[in-house]
Structures are given as structure tokens and as C-alpha cells.
Image (cartoon, rainbow, N blue to C red):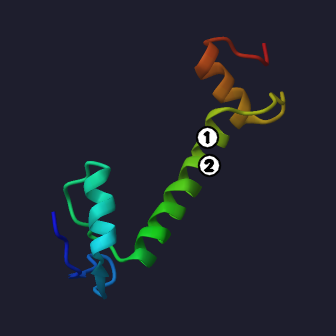
Amino acid sequence: MSYEDKNLTCVECGADFIFSAQEQEFFAAKGLTNEPKRCPDCRQARRQQRRELHRVAKRHRYPLSLEKDDPCTAASATLKSGVNPSI
């Protein structure tokens, strides 16, 4: 199939960007059927934001150590195990 460059508009910042023929071929090879909605800069910023949120969530979900005086880690341990570590 022959692809041609397309001009698209970013839904985040409103900037125009080009969805190149090479990118379209790549998307097709990966089985992706939708065109990108965000420009490359906004895609990168969104990925970075998701990575940061995932990193923070993971850190709070799995405390590295339980400290008796820290109510946050004690409460987390209680929720996970059903046993209060301070008792």
C-alpha cells in the first residue's frame, strides 16, 4: 500500500504536525489502525507523565520497609496482610 504524508492537528496543544509515510507504514506493520492524536512532543510528555505516575504509585503500593512509627507504612501493611504490625 502506498502512503503519503498527512497533516494532523494535536488534540493537546493544537499544533499541526506531519504523520509521515514512514510512520504510517510502521503503524500498519504493528497493527495500529488509528492515527496519532498528539504531536510528538505531547506524546513524549504524556509518556513521561504516565511513567512518573506509575513510579510513584508503585513506590507507595510496595513499601520497602515497615517502620513502627510511620502510620502510612503501618496502615499499608495492615491492609495487605490483615494483621497490624504494631500489635
- Judged from this view, the residue extending furthest toward the front is 1
Label 2 amino acid?
A: Arg
Instruction: Tell me where residue 40 appears, x and y as whole percent.
Output: 41, 75
Q: Mark 1 points at which residue?
A: 58
- Quadrant of the image for the C terminus? top right
The local secondary structure at tag 2 comes to helix
Q: Mark 2 points at which residue?
A: 55
Image quarter of residue 16: bottom left
Query: Residue sitting at 20 percent across and 59 percent down?
Result: 34
Label 1 amino acid?
A: Lys
Instruction: Tell me where residue 21 appears, x and y as whole percent.
Output: 27, 74
| Neighbourhood count class around disc 1 (C-alpha, 10 Å): few under 14, some 14–19, many 20 upward | few
Query: Residue sitting at 69 percent across and 36 percent down?
Result: 72
Query: Residue sitting at 79 percent across and 19 percent down?
Result: 86
Instruction: Tell me where residue 59 appears, x and y as whole percent.
Output: 67, 42
Q: Give left or right: position of 33 versus 52.
A: left
Query: Residue sitting at 33 percent across and 70 percent down?
Result: 22
Q: Circles 1 and 2: CB distance less than 8 Å? A: yes
Q: Which of 17 and 49 is in front in this view?
A: 17
